[in-house]
Amino acid sequence: MKYYNVDNFNEMLEKSIRENWDMPALTNYLTGETFTYGKMAQAIAEVHQLFKELEIEEGDKIALVGKNTPEWAIVFLATVTYGATIVPILQNFPIDDIHHIVNHSESKLLFVSDNLKEQVMEDHMRKLKCIYCYTEKYLIHQSTKKVIPAKIQELRDKTSVAYPNGIQKEDIHYAKRKGDDIFALNYTSGTTGFSKGVLQTYENIRGNIGFVIEKNLAYKGNKILTFLPLAHTYGCTLDFLSQITNGSHITFLNKIPAPQILVKAFEEVKPNVVFTVPLIVEKIYRSVAEPIITKHAAFMSEEELKASIYPKVRNMMIQIFGGNFKQVIIGGAPLNAEIEESLTKLEFPFAVGYGMTECSPLISFVNLEEFMPKSVGKPLRNMEVRIDSEDEENIAGEILVKGQNITPGYYKNPTETAKTFDEDGWFHTGDIGTLSKDGYLFIKGRCKTMILGPSGQNIYPEALEAKLTNMPFVSECLIVEKEGKLIALVYPDMRAMDEINIQKEDLQGIMDENKKKFNQAVANYEQISEIILYPNEFEKTPKKNIKRYLYESHK
């Protein structure tokens, strides 16, 4: 295992700002407003002035919740370059959870966007010095008697006094932080219960950015369209931190990433690399590629499809993602096996990675040249992986990891930290998998979701759900155990039903046929006994994983 030895994050950002001073850094897709690297440095200095007025010290926690915008990014960067610890909070968390996280993290200051300013309640967060609306630039609340500047112009005036000649390249000197200092405190939104505060060090960030640089996924002039939640480590590290330290130009979508919105944005931005989650790719494939392939497959052989149809569909898919990218990188959740196979047939340029918040986030990755079907790639060179089984290649077991990217633990939660790390220092991921002799990692499912079959067989519901989701009129599904039998909870594909005028009363018969075909395709112990229709989409985490724990009552 070899660690990445790039500079500390604050040093990398200093260098990037100086070298890219007049280049675009951050753009709001909705308004078109753009911050150059120099203008971004000026905005960071203004936030630093606010911190000084509030007597914020190095190591203090600063909470940040709201829309992904250039201003969000500036608050984030200002916090870590000041030497404080950022606490990014997902804006779709319930408001009570936001209050709890602010209190649990002992944050001194809370930044919010305008859509949340009326919801947060200062009386529920009494340790705060103030709440500041970063989109509209004014103070909402202060708990000290000291007069705090409430308008951004006052901060700019004070910053001008500190820098009478304006911010210059030579003025960019940020806090010196050690590798084991805490960079961020990330509260997870896992599918199995309430979030935990994951400690993220500067060394963790350095390991991930080092990998991104090695794979040439961030570089000067690189264009990025970011639509993933930046309060989550996947989007934050790959779409934002790795890019801003390497001279990229980041455009913030700042809208719900519906397929039609994304397609238009991809066309306009033309990103050089796309970081996304499986759900986005699956929706685009099913709406664009699958109908064309299905239509021609009725009268053409696989060889004919490969010769004339696949190249056309591949080009359509490439144009949908902007037509200017090297590869689409898919992570954050498992990619449907049949969609992966279809993309491979099309020779669509995609790559797959595996990680988690506790690894900031990367554990393994496979690029185009090393692609192995159904694998999530090989462990990064700064990470060790082993399988907790007697035969790593053939017998699935829990995936254990060590390395530069691993969190030191959970904030104020020594019990959970002790449960997650064993005495030899291995981090227990909670995922089940195998590891091939040539180093490829294969994910089978989650420890907590694995179902024990009637004769002791291991049943991985995620793999079965992937099969069922590919059947007619199944939009989403969950497979759970009930009284020793497997049942499937299915949210039907209403749009597909409407397109060919399928009535709701006919749907159960279609599902019965799906059940029959499904059971013919799986082992006896994996067969489902019933399909239960659900009227609404299942509730999901920001990574688009279904929150299984909400549906445990069906067991």
Image: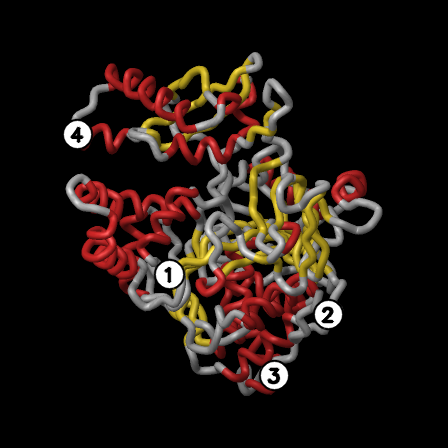
Three-letter code for the amino acid on which mark 3 is drawn: Asp
For label 1, the residue is 349
Q: Which quadrant holds the C terminus? A: top right
Three-letter code for the amino acid on which mark 1 is drawn: Pro
Q: What amino acid is at disc 4? A: Ile
Foreground tag (4 vs 1): 1
Q: Closer to us: mark 3 or mark 1?
A: 1
Residue 350 percent across, percent down from the top left = 41, 58
Which residue is the site of mark 2? 177
Residue name at image x 56 percent, y 39 percent: 444
Q: Earlier in the sequence, mark 2 or mark 4?
A: 2
Q: CA distance from mark 2 to mark 1?
A: 38 Å
Q: Are marks 2 and 1 in contact (CB under 8 Å)?
A: no
Q: Which mark is residue 171?
A: 3
Provide the residue designation for mark 4: 500
Dot 4: what SS?
loop
Which residue is located at x 61 percent, y 45 percent? 434
Q: Earlier in the sequence, mark 2 or mark 1?
A: 2
